[in-house]
Amino acid sequence: MKHLLSLETMSREDMELVLRDAAVFKKTRGKHATQPLAGQTWALIFSKSSTRTRVSFEVGIRELGGNALFLNANDIQLGRGEPIKDTARVLGRMIHGAVIRTFAQSDVEEFAKYSKIPTVNALTDDEHPCQILTDIFTYQEKKGSIAGKVVTFVGDGACNVPASWVFAAAKLGFELRIAAPKAYQPTDALIARAGSAHFHEAGGNRYFTFVGGGKVVCMEDLKAALTGSDLLYTDVWVSMGKEAESAQRLKDLAGYQINAELVKVANPGALVMHCLPAYRGKEIDEATLEAHADTIFEQAENRLHTQKAIMNWMVV
Ligand code: CP
Ligand code: NVA
């Protein structure tokens, strides 16, 4: 039984397989050789808003031959307090796979354990694995292997999206720089979970060099972080569930915007990506988002192709 709960626990070989298959699913859209979800019903159980993830999974499930069932967590008894483990045991007897967007990572893990059906993390407070696999697929289809390249994440470096990037860097051998104020950088403990690493600190920066290749560097100096960068990446400053901290976050992160001035510091031809939704004038300026819209919206489209590859990997 395969799940995709976290990039921490996904092997490099499995990531590479999914990335290869995503290209095949993209190329053969509308004429796939197989229908790996034929006769299956997969449920999407969402406790948070979604445009891209919901639509790409619903369409992807149908295009792989399956039926998609969208369940807003508030509309089922889960929202009135029925335990996850009971919900999981009921659904596990009726459906064939689950795609879950929620708050606690432990809830997705508990669902997988009790439902005994393939379960996908479609975003928790801790991780967003489908997004980062898609982002890497998008980088590689445009620029070739990400191994040895420099990816700079700018903004809230302590949320779910950069956490999945940290695990990917250690597995796929690229350098991930997190440009963020200290309080918005990933913790030593999180980075240590990505693999054995040599650690040193210099000039206020934290450097982790993984034994198997790959690096994570946490730094406050945005210009230094962008120098020599091949991919500039950002995400919202206020993740879902953090709305009460909005005012403080907007203040703390104000200097960490990807804008036209800063793109010039990166390598010529560097890509700019955003997982979306984007808040113009906050984590990215309007001009930069529009200048890189082709990449950013292809990145969004690629959720469909990559998630088909993920579900195919889980069931075949
Ligand atoms: N990037 C992403 O997951 O978008 P949605 O929240 O719209 O699903
Ligand atoms: N970090 C963001 C990602 C949105 C796709 C959030 O959790 O809201």
Image (spheres, helix red, strand yellow):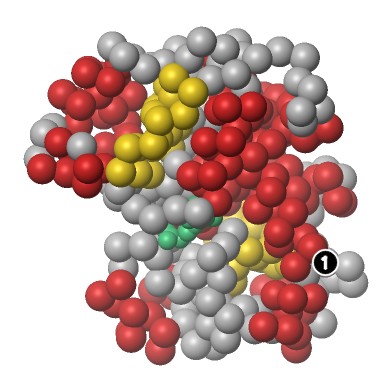
Residue 140 in the image: above or below residue 274: above
Depth check, front residue: 269 or 130: 130
| Quadrant assignment for ligand 2 | bottom left
Residue 191 at x, y percent in the picture: 48, 51
Q: Residue 208 lies in what quarter of the image?
A: bottom right
Depth check, front residue: 45 or 13: 45
Q: Which residue is located at x 28 percent, y 20 percent? A: 91
Q: Which residue is located at x 56 percent, y 16 percent? A: 37
Q: Quadrant of the C terminus?
A: top right
Q: Which residue is located at x 30 percent, y 72 percent? A: 243
Residue 146 in the image: above or below residue 40: below
Depth check, front residue: 204 or 294: 294
Q: Quadrant of the N terminus?
A: top left
| Left or right of residue 272: residue 4 | left
Q: Which residue is located at x 40 percent, y 30 percent? A: 69
Residue 215 at x, y percent in the picture: 64, 52
Residue 66 at x, y percent in the picture: 53, 20
Question: Can I make out residue 128 in this image?
Answer: yes
- Classed neighbour count for the residue bearing mark 1: other residues with Cα under 10 Å, few (<14), some (14–19), many (≥20): some
Residue 117 at x, y percent in the picture: 38, 17
Q: Residue furthest left?
A: 81
**Label 1 SS:** loop
Question: Can I make out residue 256 in this image?
Answer: no
| Left or right of residue 310: residue 70 | left
Q: Residue 290 lies in what quarter of the image?
A: bottom right
- Count all numbered tags in the image, as a single digit: 1
Residue tagged 1: 270
| Left or right of residue 93: residue 150 | right
Query: What amino acid does circle 1 point to?
Result: Ala
Q: CB of residue at label 1: within 8 Å of ligand 1?
A: no
